[in-house]
Amino acid sequence: MTRKKKFHGGYTPRRLQPPKKSTGMIVLFSAVAVVLIAVLSAGGYLMSLANTFDKKTQTIESAFPDENLRPVKNPEDGSLNFLLLGVDSGADGTQASDMLSGGGTDQRSDSMMLMHIPANRQGVYVMSIMRDLWTEIPGYGKHKINASMAFGGVPLAVQTIEGMFDTKIDHVAMIDFDGFKELSTALGGVTVQNDIEFWSTDKKKYHYPVGELNLQGNKALRFVRERKPFIDGDYQRVRNQQTFVKAAISELLSKNTLTNPATVYEVIDKVAPYLSFDNGFDSASAAGLALQMKSLRAGNVEMFTLPTDGTGTSPDGQSIILRNEQAILDIGAALRSDTFSSYVANTTFSH
């Protein structure tokens, strides 16, 4: 089987050398991609999808910090934690491989999500983490959480999240914005229920009226990236991200998609070149996860945002999101004890 090309210290998607401006917050489709690979692989296309996965995806060789800096996971804990990352574009001429190197770059992760799959594989839980959350970054003191990528690349981003929840991350996944557009287009668009009318702030000025919208390509991208049109900015952007992801997963797991080999192949073939994973997640890992999650349906995917204590101002005058310490403690405990599904079921999340 052909192995995917590996790049020490980072990844090098073919369409990002040098990177385009505004790679954006497309991390949300890493979640979709992982679920897609797992479930569709179990739908009868395993060998073809495995070959495509290994040939076309990229590998993040240096995804994790030194083992002595990480929490210890109970060997009997069969749950999985994925850290899903997106990055802003950097200065002109910055190579994509620098963006995810083991050292610092001028890049900040534009979005983070923690995806938890319990040991019984009876669901997928995706938690958005606000990018301006004010938190401790190991070795650098308190900063917005998205600065961890700028200071120390993917390993420091992982270490920051692991330290926050005292929980080990098993895998890291990432996708760039061209992959997002390819996915929404390959599906023939994704239908969402939009609750707030707005116009995009880019040159095309897309209009998003209230009601049911079918989105694909650039218009889909702008829907999940916009924050300036909203009173609560990033909070509404995260809500739109979650709305879109839920709709996309529903479409991906629909009978019409799963029973159409041409659509399945097109989605994987088009999106795979834009995906990057740590070197421990390959087609064999995806296949194993697929067999365990073959009964997954859209209703088994839960999405929410890490509770916060609202907005504030940092000592140096930055607008920040304040940590909800009790929520962080409770979530960490639930992750370590594989009781996250119970935590989510018994918690009311604000929207």
Image (spheres, rainbow, N blue to C red):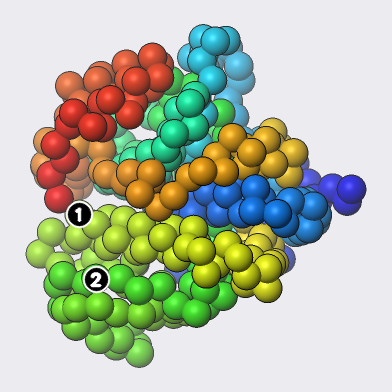
Q: Position of residue 146 (x, y in %)?
A: 38, 44
| Residue 162 placement, left or right of 229 | right
Frontmost residue, 6 versus 99: 6
Q: Residue at x 47, y 63 (%)?
A: 254
Frontmost residue, 255 versus 164: 255
Distance between the alpha carbons at the discs numbered 1 and 2: 17 Å
Residue 178 visible (yes or no)? no
| Residue 113 placement, left or right of 288 | left
Residue behind mark 1 = 235
Frontmost residue, 285 versus 73: 285
Give SS at disc 1: helix
Q: Residue at x 57, y 10 (%)?
A: 75
Q: Position of residue 83 (x, y in %)?
A: 48, 38
Placement of 44 over or under 146, stated as above or below: below
The 10 Å Cα crowd at callout 2, few under 14, some 14 to 19, many 20 or more, is some
Q: Position of residue 320 (x, y in %)?
A: 19, 44
Residue behind mark 2 = 193
Q: Residue at x 14, y 72 (%)?
A: 196
Question: Mark 1 or 2, which is nearer the eye?
Answer: 2
Give SS at disc 2: strand
